[in-house]
Image: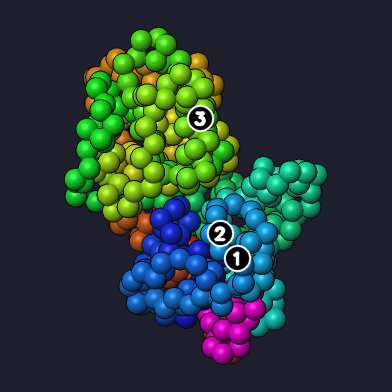
């Protein structure tokens, strides 16, 4: 098949959605499909396993595009739509694989060119906008109706978690849906940097890895860590990732809470070194407080051989349970309790870490990702009509659509 992938984001960047997009296009190219990837003008050029990378033209005065909604993204989305229309006029594509808001672009272009599209959902956009944009809550019903229509018009949906799968089934019950969870990104190599030595750490080391956006719950984590320290837990907390502005914000919070000497901000580190850093921790923490999609970091956490503490929110519990992680209510006291109990119970830490690695190997490995995506596209290729037949969305999911329950 000839596939046009629309990814409205800087590419490549070492953060969740660009990492998932890279895996997507590499897997499709390796399966023998001809893949063109269209992204924003910013980002690093990386090998894509045979897929071809295209970018929109640089947009004047638009740079440093971050995750989430912004006017910068809106401007770039318009440029992406124009470039995608040009590409569709220049070549005939069998399907458009549209990531996030690009589905609405594909919806319009699909009608104009009779090209079917897949809606690739990393999150529910009405929920995200209502959370990120002040005053947007009133528009949520309208946004949900628009999203539902885009799902109904699509040839299929690709989602990253069970909560989004349920959203598709509710909004568009006839639309085939593939639940394609993220996978562990760990490599075996160690790193030269020793965080314990760099930050003069004595005693247990807690660790968080990821961006420092508000929904990640870093404020909650620092408050919980303060309580744990007051209770006599002799730990340090290392936080890897985040922009300079966010690091400054949370460093000030740690100082206000009186734990500045025990909370260490390492800043961003290369993705290829992730495993080497995770293995330096005694306990890994994911304090996310908002959202329904599972953080990509969770799969690497589980594969690291280190135990995980996470908030008892749907964003976590659709993947995590008490067999493989310590779960806590999203309050400072509850999170501090969970951290303290785990640090004081070495046997429990070892049991959680061992079972977590087994779960990843079975359900969240790169091999499982490739198998599910390849089978879905095999089905799609058979389900779509021939070039000389009318283009309509197929409405029967593949019988071999295997996924963990």
Q: Is residue 234 left or right of residue 376?
A: left
Query: Does the magenta segment cover residue 402?
Result: no
Q: Quadrant of the C terminus?
A: top left
Q: Which residue is mark 3?
A: 252
Report how many numbered discs are placed on residues in the image.
3
Q: Nearer the viewer, residue 40 or 387?
A: 40
Pointer 1 residue: 62
Relative depth, front residue between 343 and 62: 62
Find disc 2 in the rendering and name its residue. 65
In depth, the one of 302 and 284 nearer the eye is 284
Whether pointer 2 and pointer 1 mark residues with C-beta atoms closer than 8 Å, the reply is: yes
Q: Position of residue 91 (x, y in %)?
A: 54, 88
Residue 320, placed above or below residue 108: above
Q: Is residue 395 above or below residue 288?
A: below
**Kind of element beneath mark 3:** helix
Q: Nearer the viewer, mark 1 or mark 3?
A: 3
Mark 2 or mark 1, whichever is nearer to me: 1
Assess whether residue 94 is covered by the magenta stretch. Answer: yes
Q: CA distance from mark 3 to mark 2?
A: 25 Å
Is residue 318 something that shows in the picture? no
Q: Reading the chain from its start, which is encountered first: label 3 or label 2?
A: 2
């Amino acid at each position: 098949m000839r596939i046009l992938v629309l990814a409205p984001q800087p590419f490549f960047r070492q953060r969740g959605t660009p990492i998932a997009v890279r895996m997507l296009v590499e897997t499709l190219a390796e399966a023998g499909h001809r893949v063109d990837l269209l992204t924003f003008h910013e980002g690093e050029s990386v090998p894509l396993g045979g897929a071809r990378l295209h970018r929109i033209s640089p947009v004047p005065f638009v740079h440093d595009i971050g995750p989430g909604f912004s006017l910068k993204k809106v401007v770039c989305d318009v440029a992406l739509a124009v470039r995608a229309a040009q590409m569709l006029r220049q070549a005939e594509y069998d399907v458009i694989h549209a990531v996030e808001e690009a589905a609405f672009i594909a919806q319009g272009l699909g009608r104009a060119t009779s090209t079917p599209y897949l809606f690739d959902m990393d999150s529910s956009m009405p929920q995200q906008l209502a959370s990120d944009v002040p005053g947007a809550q009133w528009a949520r019903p309208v946004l949900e109706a628009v999203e539902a229509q885009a799902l109904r018009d699509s040839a299929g949906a690709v989602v990253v978690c069970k909560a989004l799968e349920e959203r598709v089934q509710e909004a568009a019950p006839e639309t085939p849906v593939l639940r394609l969870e993220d996978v562990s990104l760990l490599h075996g190599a160690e790193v030269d940097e020793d965080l314990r030595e760099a930050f003069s750490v004595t005693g247990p080391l807690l660790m968080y890895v990821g961006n420092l956006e508000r929904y990640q719950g870093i404020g909650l984590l620092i408050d919980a860590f303060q309580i744990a320290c007051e209770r006599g837990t002799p730990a340090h907390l290392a936080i890897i990732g985040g922009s300079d502005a966010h690091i400054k914000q949370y460093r000030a919070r740690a100082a206000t809470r009186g734990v500045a000497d025990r909370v260490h901000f390492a800043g961003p580190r290369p993705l290829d070194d992730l495993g080497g850093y995770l293995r330096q921790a005694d306990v890994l923490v994911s304090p996310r407080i908002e959202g329904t999609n599972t953080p990509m970091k969770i799969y690497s956490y589980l594969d690291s051989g280190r135990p995980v503490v996470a908030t008892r929110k749907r964003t976590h519990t659709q993947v995590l349970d008490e067999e493989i992680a310590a779960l806590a209510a999203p309050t400072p006291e509850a999170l501090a309790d969970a951290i303290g109990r785990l640090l004081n119970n070495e046997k429990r830490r070892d049991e959680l870490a061992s079972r977590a690695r087994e779960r990843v190997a079975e359900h969240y490995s790169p091999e499982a990702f490739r198998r599910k995506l390849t089978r879905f596209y095999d089905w799609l290729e058979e389900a779509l009509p021939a070039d000389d037949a009318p283009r309509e969305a197929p409405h029967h999911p593949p019988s071999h659509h295997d996924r963990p329950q």
